[in-house]
Amino acid sequence: MAKITKRSEDYSRWYTDVIMQAELADYAPVKGCMVIRPNGYAIWEKIQSVLDRMFKETGHRNAYFPLFIPESFMRREAEHVEGFAPECAVVTHGGGKKLEEPLYVRPTSETIIWAMYKDWIQSYRDLPLLINQWCNVVRWEMRTRLFLRTTEFLWQEGHTAHATEAEAEEEARKILQIYRTFAEEYMAMPVIPGQKTEKEKFAGALRTYTIEAMMQDRRALQAGTSHNLGQNFARAFDVKYQDENGELQYVWATSWGVSTRLIGALIMTHSDDQGLVLPPRLATLEVVVVPIWKGDDEMSQMKEAAHRLADSWKGKLTYHVDDREGYRPGWKFNEWESKGVPVRVELGPRDLQRNEATLVRRDTGERTTVPQDRILEAIKDLLEDIQSSLFRRALEFREKYTFVVDGYDEFKEKIDEPGGFFLVHWCGDRACEDRLQEETKATIRCIPFDRPAERGRCLLCGRPSDGRVVAAKAY
RNA sequence: CGGGGCGUAGCGCAGUCCGGCCAGCGCGCCUGCUUUGGGAGCAGGAGGUCCCGAGUUCGAAUCUCGGCGCCCCGACCA
């Protein structure tokens, strides 16, 4: 097995190594595309099941819309087509003939969905319409990176229609809150919820909300977005409803999504030089048991003891007994560590004799010995402790690299090294935002929801500002 | 699309400058034996359109021309 490049040596190689070693994904024989392997797909399925439950609990239902979008649909909303058309794959031929109208492979589904909503919505009684779709989308990116940016990726996209602006706004914020809860409670990844600037908002949206996370190289990663689309798409697709007074009104809309990029976020938040570290709540395999023996007699004895112990967890834990004979224990330890299994149970003759087992936690490597009759609860406790300490550690890391900065010189000095999140004053002007990006490669990640009101002067132009924004280099 | 690098066994590479020896090395894989509390040892074995095409030559992985692909760095992006 290959060694994993150290983070300190080459962060992006480390990232790829972790993915390859854990067998999460592989490069596909198609430019810019990846194969998500079973270990990676299992994480996605876990993400899906949790989020899907959360969406359904808030009244959303799943549906499926076509992969192909007629070109004319894409052109209906001006900002939208301008934002997306350059990065779209377009089908011009089918069945051996040139198509009358080119078909865009969806980069996102607002247009095709709103074309349908036009037929489905007539009355205020049809609202709200709360639909989600799990699917793939294609964006012809120039530079790709496993999970973070590939030509095709998997995601969910919610598309909702509402009678009032206030309702749409509430929906957009409610979903962002779901994303935040998921990121923090399941991924153990702290995020900053806030609003995108005009420059960074979704093409066609009124407002975009985002959750921003800090990776271990101190760069920001946009982990999920929720858009208040206003009436832009309703106007573009002529979707009106009749209100209680019999008057025709344009519908208010939202859309929101998270993608397989979350798996990249997971890796870059928790993993270490040994390989993948998974928060227990997203680990598909929680415990691996490694029996240890010398000689054939002991082998059968230890294998049996390991299976007996593990079988008592059936239905309570997901586990695997690694009783392969061709590999030595040390090899297995490394292998399971690189795959991110949160807890390892070692069971050797010494342990068996004392009716004990050895527990090793993946995040810290700490080992403890516990009596076998208490092992199930010990593992359960350990899993919870790993979950919460991963979050705590990530939060401490983010706080350590979050700087309150007022001077542009100081900003420029620190943005590359050490890097991180910079809380800075900004006048709100696009020109200053552009300049910041040009001169430092940093962008305004968001205007945090919970920022305190504070009088200050714009980092760039010195004009007044009434609160700080988060600036960082981003993926 | 601009800059850089690379295509030789599943993976990582050497050989290419300066043409000729059986196309090699490490890891992995298979078989056997010994091992097994932190990446085992020995022995044997399988595995190749040397990216593709054309050319030069008695002879091409190596030289020439053309093409294709991938990776990394930039601008773009979930």
Image (cartoon, coloured by chain):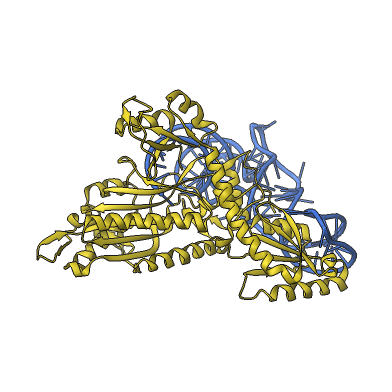
Position in image of residue A425 (x %, y %): 38, 32
**Identity of the residue drawn at 83% across and 74% down:** A301
**Identity of the residue drawn at 61% across and 53% down:** A276
In-front residue for pair A271/B15: A271
Q: Which chain is yellow?
A: A
Rendered view: A288 above or below A13 = below
Residue A175 as seen in the image, left or right of residue A144: left
In-front residue for pair A330/A426: A426
**Identity of the residue drawn at 70% across and 72% down:** A310
Q: Please indicate, yes or no, whether residue A91 appears anywhere in the rendered image.
A: no
Q: Which chain is blue?
A: B
In-front residue for pair A244/B23: A244
**Identity of the residue drawn at 46% across and 51% down:** A32
Q: Please indicate, yes or no, whether residue A118 appears anywhere in the rendered image.
A: yes
Position in image of residue A404 (x %, y %): 46, 32
Q: Quadrant of residue A119?
A: bottom left
**How many numbered markers are drawn?**
0
Rendered view: A177 above or below A199 = below
Image quarter of the N terminus of chain A: bottom right
Residue A417 as seen in the image, left or right of residue A86: right
Position in image of residue A348 (x %, y %): 81, 65
Position in image of residue B77 (x %, y %): 38, 46
